[in-house]
Image (tube, coloured by chain):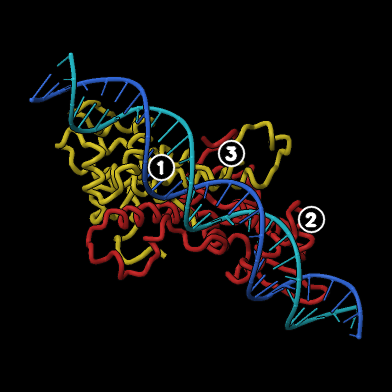
Chain colours: A red, B yellow, C blue, D cyan
DNA sequence: TCATACTGTACTAAAAGGGTCCTATTTTTA
DNA sequence: TAAAAATAGGACCCTTTTAGTACAGTATGA
């Protein structure tokens, strides 16, 4: 299966949680851990990565905490996943230096991966964090031309 | 990064290889291994999985081999990936039995995963094996409404 | 100046993935 | 009829990655 690590999953939960409570200026790592039933060290680690990717801003000190760096509608799911798992690519070959495999002008692995990666990352770049905030109501996302595309009601399981 | 295993990668190469040579009725595991510079046991394992998923048909005996079960234009990339990696889902939660997490009506993890999985699998279901056969010429895929969507020329690297 | 909270690094156990080997079954050919 | 070629299915081991934890350091505000 195409796998997102558990940590990325938790990261999405944290981002969604913060996006839901836009009135609260700051969220401490401790509060986020308690409110989402996640271990504090793990939450702390995730927040750090999201901070380095500039998706969060932090405020240190006794009244410190984290908050979203941008409105939820301007943060793509692709950005969050990239922050937590690295570039969206399917094997090493897609991101590597170009010196290794390029002498072979039609390496089938490389081109396959590029096509598939493009399709996947394109889909994720059209999904915004705001779309995850009220997931039960979501029935459509934007396609690559900005038009709304129905993806069906969210019900039952995927496969 | 969103990861497809190496084995899935090899599997795509094998399928593409067979799709390119539609004149050859059968391909032995040994030939496929040699022509794609892959170890025979690995190739054999992959062909087995693709066979069980009914993407290939096999012919046993001394003149045996494998061939595509359907025309390349009727096989989706999603089918191939599902055959080799299991259902396209991002964590266990998306495929599990429904008794575990469903009493919580708004489990944020589950709904997030469903939305993201839907976006990803939708993109992969629109990519056909035939689209990988001549990858250098591909510049567009069909969106969910059947319209062609430019995904850009295949050049350089993804990220 | 102390308590609180973020910052950064390092380490260890568990799970998954990749790869190989062995044996049985089927079919064609000599 | 027997041998060879090829698929069918399962079991096994090793490496890598991931998840989770711990600890020391730094900045801020009461």
Gap between marks 1 and 2, in whole Å?
37 Å
Residue A109 in the image: state x and y as whole percent. Answer: 31, 54
SS at mark 2 in the image: helix
Residue B121 in the image: state x and y as whole percent. Answer: 46, 43
- For disc 3, the marked residue is A154
Image disc number at residue B81: 1
- For disc 2, the marked residue is A34
Gap between marks 3 and 2, in whole Å?
28 Å
Residue that appears at 54% across and 48% down? B116
Indicate the quadrant where residue D3 lies.
top left
Task: Name the one closer to the observer, A68 or B19.
Answer: B19
In the image, is B110 to the left or to the right of D24? left
Residue that appears at 78% across and 54% down? A35
Disc nearest the viewer among 3 and 2: 2
Task: Name the one closer to the observer, B148 or B10.
Answer: B10
Label 3 with label 2: CB-CB less than 8 Å:
no
- Do the residues at discs 1 and 2 belong to one chain? no
Residue B107 visible from this viewpoint: yes
SS at mark 3 in the image: loop
- State how many labels appear: 3
Disc nearest the viewer among 3 and 1: 1
Image disc number at residue B53: none
**On what subunit does the disc labeled 3 rest?**
A
**On what subunit does the disc labeled 2 rest?**
A
> Taking B152 as reference, is B77 above or below it?
above
In the image, is B141 to the left or to the right of B30? right
């Amino acid at each position: 299966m195409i796998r997102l690590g558990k940590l990325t999953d938790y990261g999405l939960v944290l981002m969604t949680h913060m996006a839901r409570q836009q009135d609260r200026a700051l969220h401490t790592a401790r509060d986020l851990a308690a409110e989402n039933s996640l271990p504090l060290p793990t939450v702390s680690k995730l927040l750090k990565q999201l901070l380095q990717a500039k998706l969060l801003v932090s405020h240190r000190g006794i009244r410190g905490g984290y908050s979203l760096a941008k409105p939820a509608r301007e943060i793509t799911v692709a950005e969050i996943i990239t922050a937590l798992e690295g570039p969206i690519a399917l094997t090493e070959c897609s991101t590597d230096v170009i010196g290794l495999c390029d002498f072979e002008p039609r390496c089938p692995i490389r081109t396959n991966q590029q096509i598939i990666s493009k399709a996947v990352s394109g889909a994720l770049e059209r999904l915004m964090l705001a779309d995850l905030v009220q997931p039960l109501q979501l029935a459509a996302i934007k396609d690559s031309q900005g038009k709304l595309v129905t993806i069906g009601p969210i019900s039952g399981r995927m496969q």
